[in-house]
Structure formats: C-alpha cells, structure tokens
Amino acid sequence: MASKTASSSRPSAPVEPKDALSISREEQLLEELETIFLRDGFRDVTVDQLARTLHCSKRSLYALAPSKEELFLRVFDRYLSRLREDCNRGAAGVSPEQAFVPYLMPAIDAARKLSATLIRDMTAYAPANEMWERHQRDRMAGLRTLVQRCVDDGIFRNANANLVAEVVAASLRRIREPRFLAASKLSYREAVAELYGLLLHGLLHPEAADRVNEG
C-alpha cells in the first residue's frame, strides 16, 4: 500500500504537448526548405528529392502545402515577411538619417542567399514574381517615407521621395535579371549593395564633390 502511495505521489516527467512538437518540426522543415529553395530554386527540384534530403516523408511535406509550387510560395512568403520585419525593426526608434542603414542592410545581407537559380525560377513563375513585387512595393513605401522625412528635416536636398523610391524599385527589378548579373559580373548581393550605396552616397567621390563645388 505504501509502495502504491509513493508511486502515485512521484512527479511524472514533463511531456511536451503533441501540438508543440508538431509546430517545432514544421518550423524545422520550413527552415530547411528555405535553405534548399534559396540555393537551388524550385523548378528542377522534386518532392521526392526534398523528402530524401530532409529525411522526412512526402506526406510531411504535403501537410505543409498541397503542391511543390505552393510549398515554395509558403517558404518564400515566410522568408520575405521575416526580412521586412527585420528591416522595419532596425529602423524603428532612430532618427531618419540614422534609419537608412538598418533599414537597407538586412536586405543586402539577405540578398547573398538568393542564388541566380532562385531568381530565374521566381521571375518565371507568376505567383512568386507577384509576391516579390508586393514585397518590393512595401519596401519602397518605407523607403519613400524615410526619404521624405529626411527632406522635411533638411537632411536631404529637396528630392522627390516618390521618384527616389520608383528609381530604386525599377533598379531592383533590373538587377535581379540573370542577363544583367552575367553582364555586370556581379552577384545579386553585390548589385544590391552597390545600388544602395548609390542611393546613400551618390556617384561622386567626396574629394571630387569638393572640386565640383569649388568650380
């Protein structure tokens, strides 16, 4: 009897809820899929290959999305949403002129993950391309707000914030094209970094700018 009482009063080991375990595994799969898709694109990858690489069943992947294309869209949307959150968080709570670098840099750092294959597949697949365009519109709206605040505060010359944002948006569309990257001999990350450097600092070297101003 004593033995039964002692046994019944012994605390049982904590058991993680099944739902939490499922969510944890789902996040792990999404994270690993992100790495694969950003590196290899999705057009030439099969669900069988993904399942073998991730050591999971195809059923586990189809539980995330009903097709390979929709699986890619879910992973890509997750990636872009996280990127926007990082950029917005970095620019929050600082002055407009200090917000540019933390607003732009996460996108530059993230760009190194985007392979030429991913850019090709994304551009050729309308739903993914539309998702990217929505992402860029959101990013350019934030950039337009930053430019306007700097103009209003007298930090920038009286530049048109809409024009600046549209020029950057058009440039981003152009530099992601495989033919441009091949002709420029730049990676996408390098092209984005140069574009943002152009936005922040212009073309003139500081010493050259002094000579132009003196002239």
Image: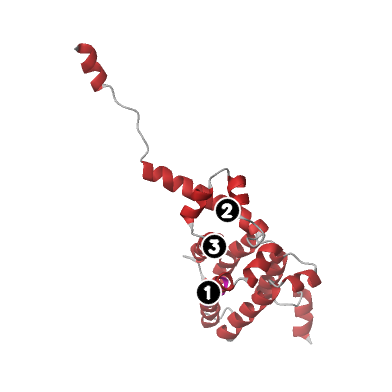
User: Measured along the vertical axis of the image, is residue 107 above or below residue 141?
Assistant: above
Residue nearer the viewer, 14 or 140:
14
Is 158 part of what is drawn in magenta?
no
Q: Amino acid at mark 1?
A: Arg
The answer to whether the residue labelled 2 contacts the one labelled 1, judged by CB atoms less than 8 Å apart, is no
Residue 165 place in picture, x, y as percent: 58, 80
Q: Which residues are magenta?
A: 132-141
Badge 2 crowding class, 10 Å Cα cut-off, few under 14, some 14 to 19, many 20 or more, is many
Task: Please give the name of the residue rendered at 60% of the width and 51% of the height, measured from the top-left corner.
Answer: 48
Q: CA distance from mark 1 to mark 3?
A: 13 Å
Q: Main secondary structure of the magenta part?
A: helix
* Residue carrying label 1: 134
Residue 46 place in picture, x, y as percent: 62, 55
Task: Please give the name of the residue rendered at 76% of the width and 66% of the height, measured from the top-left corner.
Answer: 186
Q: CA distance from mark 3 to mark 2?
A: 16 Å
Task: Please give the name of the residue rendered at 67% of the width and 60% of the height, measured from the top-left corner.
Answer: 44
Q: Amino acid at mark 3?
A: Leu
* Residue carrying label 2: 33
Instruction: Decide which of tag 1 and tag 3 comes sooner along the chain.
Output: 3
Q: Amino acid at mark 2?
A: Leu
* Residue carrying label 3: 83
Give the label, 1 or 3, closer to the camera.
1
Choose top left, top right, bottom left or bottom right for residue 80: bottom right
Instruction: Decide which of tag 3 and tag 2 comes sooner along the chain.
Output: 2
Instruction: Decide which of tag 2 and tag 1 comes sooner along the chain.
Output: 2
